[in-house]
Amino acid sequence: MKVKKELYEAFSPPKPKGRDGFLAALPYPKLSFGGFVLSQVRYIRKRLWFASAVILLAAVLYLYLAPRKIISAINLPAVWAVSSMTPFLAMLTAAEISRSGAYGMTELEAACRFSLPQLTGARVLIIGTVSFGVTALLTALSGIFTSAGVAKAALYILAPFLLVNGISLAAHTRLRDRDGSYISAATAVAVSAAGVIFPGRGLTLPESALNRACMLICAVGAVSMIISMKKIMGGIDIAARKGQL
């Protein structure tokens, strides 16, 4: 044991002197938290911004600018018309959050300047802010220009959004390939079509039962999103450890 200790001491490199001061003096560019988050905006695909703008514009045109004759001819309650647009935003949101894993870029991004959990957290913050802003504006518009009211409009708009987002994230985390995108797209189309066809044909539930159903859908979608995000962040932590080895 003594020989091993002496060999270790003989061949161990000396402790660096003034290392902390040297590292602090390096001209390393520093970013504030806000600057770091804003730097990630450029890495969000443009189709998410485009879809958000199109959905908002379509809602404004339908609720405010469309002639009453067109709305009556469509025979669809205005709040459900707006609600049927949100599944496509949810589909793109889920695809953007899980993009690193879907394209096999997790370990590469783990070796970047910022840690992968930081990168993913910043992008989720940006995407979540955009999604929340869009749904909040849709809720406000629906509450103002329809008879549903803000509370019911929020419930009817969030239900399809959370459901599609939860299913899409689960599909992306489990499959991690094109199949996840197909399932996400099919779910968005099915939920959107159901929100248009059933109310348009007068196939609606009593209001109390409808509200309870929407609450249940919101809860299921939110739980699915939380579980999927835990899996995504768990995979990120594993990849980050690999990148440090």
Image: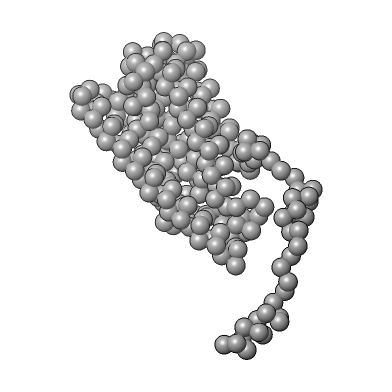
Question: Is residue 17 something one can see in this rendering?
Answer: yes
Residue at the top extreme, as displayed:
68
Question: Is residue 104 something one can see in this rendering?
Answer: no
Answer left or right for 161 relative to 102. left
Q: How many marks?
A: 0
Residue at the front extreme, as displayed:
2
Q: Residue at x 52, y 32 (%)?
A: 129
Q: Quadrant of the N terminus?
A: bottom right
Answer left or right for 210 relative to 242. left
Q: Which residue is at the front of the view, 69 or 35?
A: 35
Quarter residue 104 falls in? bottom right
Q: Which residue is at the front of the view, 99 or 7?
A: 7
Q: Residue at x 28, y 32 (%)?
A: 215
Residue 92: x and y in percent read 50, 40
Q: Residue at x 47, y 13 (%)?
A: 64
Residue 30: x and y in percent read 71, 43
Q: Residue at x 57, y 42 (%)?
A: 122
Residue 113 vs 1, above or below: the answer is above
Q: Which residue is at the front of the view, 55 or 38?
A: 38
Image colouring: one colour
Residue 216: x and y in percent read 27, 36
Q: Quadrant of the C terminus?
A: bottom right
Residue 8: x and y in percent read 65, 81
Residue 99 vs 10, above or below: the answer is above
Answer left or right for 46 relative to 164. right
